[in-house]
Image (cartoon, helix red, strand yellow):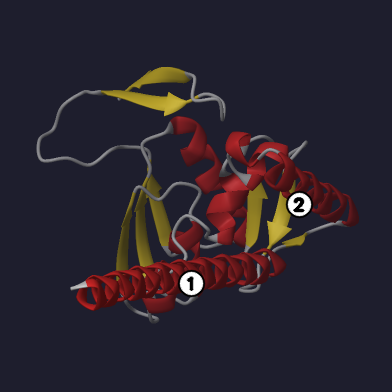
Amino acid sequence: MKRYQNNKKVDQNFKCQNNIQVVRIKAYFQAYIGIFVFLKDLMDGFRAYREIRGYTFKDSFFLYLCYFESALNFLLRRKNFTTVGAYLRRDILLRNRDGLLLYARAFSEDLGHYVGIAKPSTKKWFKPKAGDTVIDIGSSVGKFALFAAKLGARVFAFEANPETYAILMRNIEYNRLSNIVAFNIALGETKCKAKLFVPVTLLNNRSRYDL
């Protein structure tokens, strides 16, 4: 009887040790996966930011100063980090690898839109050709609309926010694109007037536009 009880205890201890080992293996595996994903996102972000250059020396200076301050704040105060554009101290003009000139406002999300962090996979499949018709609803500052027009597509861009629409129009003028038409309206099922709430600052205070 004692041998049976001892064997039973040994079996239970063996099972507990196996369970602990399985839990540890799962924890290590999840940690390695998390580290891999973090490093991949970091490298993708680094490559994306390298594709953007300042148009002049002064633009480049404020751009790299923004990168430095945003990286420092991301490491030290990650919970309060919003977007890299929050650390851009003045309006600058940029040029991306497609040769497009892009206007970025200080303390805004423009820089993040141009880099493509918000929609990193879109450009992988978005490959319009010359002669195509592209309708960009919610065009924002025109990252994809400008790209399509640069490739020769006919583009209709719709942006409801008047301030963002002004930057879109400025980008079209800078790049001298005649095959893109922009509209400062919102699209919906019915024709009506509506109120558009948009962020005033990156602190999520809001203002209102009547459309």
Residue shown at 35%/75% (left/top)?
14
* Disc 1 secondary structure class: helix
Q: Which residue is mark 1?
A: 33
The answer to whether mark 1 and mark 2 are in CB contact below 8 A is no
Q: Nearer the viewer, residue 158 or 59?
A: 59
Q: Position of residue 173 (x, y in %)?
A: 59, 53
Mark 2 Cα shell of 10 Å, populated few (<14), some (14-19), many (≥20): some
Residue shown at 36%/36% (left/top)?
160
Alpha carbon distance from label 1 to label 2: 27 Å
Q: Position of residue 32 (x, y in %)?
A: 53, 72
Q: Is residue 124 above or below residue 81?
A: below
Q: Amino acid at mark 2?
A: Tyr
Residue shown at 42%/60% (left/top)?
180
The residue positioned farthest toward the front in the image shown: 1
Q: Amino acid at mark 1?
A: Ile
Mark earlier in primary sequence (1, 2): 1
Q: Quadrant of the C terminus?
A: top left
- Find residue 19 and name its label: none
Q: Which residue is mark 2?
A: 67
Q: Position of residue 159 (x, y in %)?
A: 38, 42
Q: Nearer the viewer, residue 15 or 141?
A: 15
